[in-house]
Image (cartoon, rainbow, N blue to C red):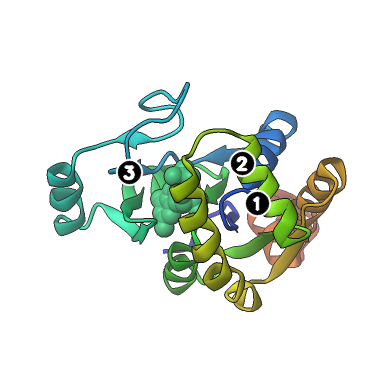
Amino acid sequence: MDYPGNLFVVAAPSGAGKSSLVKALMEVDAGVRPCISHTTRAPRGQELDGREYHFVSDQVFDAMAANGDFVEWANVHGKRYGTSRQTIEQRMAAGHDVVLEIDWQGALQIRLRFARAILIFVLPPSWDELRARLTRRGEDSVDVIELRLANAREELAQAKHFDYVIINEVFERALFDLKAIVHAQRLKYSAQARARTDTFRALNIL
Ligand code: 5GP
């Protein structure tokens, strides 16, 4: 199915800062909508059901996966995460641009289903900085931080499959880069023709 909106997929190892970047993008760009994922992990800190994630049991996740309710799902750090087919299709059919904040496995599955998806990988500036950020946010135990760092080594190797890379060294610069990617995508001929069909018709170029 061809949708009028654009689909952006942002992946990164945890601690690279992708959540903050995506949140900041949505604050300044009302045209970009999120798609709240389902997960079997427990809420952390101030997280609320239905805001950061839909927190579900293993049984509910199994049933949804078996029912084909996810456009992609993956096992990340021992817990499962999935993107709701209904939510993403509704948002895109309504002409919104959608941004998915998911892991690299999910991103590559999305590309198979939505050929026009734009895949963006966020890199930390260094290993030391990644470790420092994971430690600073104080959400995880030392064991969990070590697991996340070990996983990050494999995750970073996937960056080469993505369309764009943002190095999140200085937050404002990384946000500028993300906005630039979104903006450039919207200016592509095919995206303009979908978003501004009336203008194109009136100019006799469709
Ligand atoms: P966290 O537990 O730190 O919120 O997320 C762990 C990882 O799972 C992050 O890389 C996050 O982007 C990813 N993730 C969140 N939602 C989804 C999803 O729906 N699908 C996939 N494949 N990964 C997700």
Q: CA distance from mark 3 to mark 1?
A: 24 Å
Residue 24 coordinates in the image, percent (x, y)? 71, 34
Looking at the image, tell me whether mark 2 or mark 3 is earlier in sequence order: 3
Type of amino acid under label 3: Thr
Type of amino acid under label 2: Thr
Q: Quadrant of the N terminus?
A: bottom left
Type of amino acid under label 1: Arg
Residue at mark 3: 39
Residue 101 coordinates in the image, percent (x, y)? 53, 49
Residue at mark 2: 135
**Which dot, 3 or 1, sits closer to the camera?**
1
Residue lying furthest front: 142
Residue drawn at (68%, 66%) of the image:
190
Residue 91 coordinates in the image, percent (x, y)? 47, 42
Residue drawn at (76%, 51%) of the image:
178
Report crowding for label 2: few under 14, some 14 to 19, many 20 or more residues within 10 A (C-alpha). Answer: some
Residue at mark 1: 131
Report crowding for label 3: few under 14, some 14 to 19, many 20 or more residues within 10 A (C-alpha). Answer: many
Residue 27 coordinates in the image, percent (x, y)? 70, 29
**In the foreground, 28 or 4:** 28
The reply to whether residue 102 is visible in this rendering is no
The response on whether ligand 1 sits within 8 Å of label 3 is yes
139 shown above or below 120: above
**In the foreground, 61 or 41:** 41
Residue drawn at (30%, 54%) of the image:
70
Residue drawn at (38%, 42%) of the image:
87
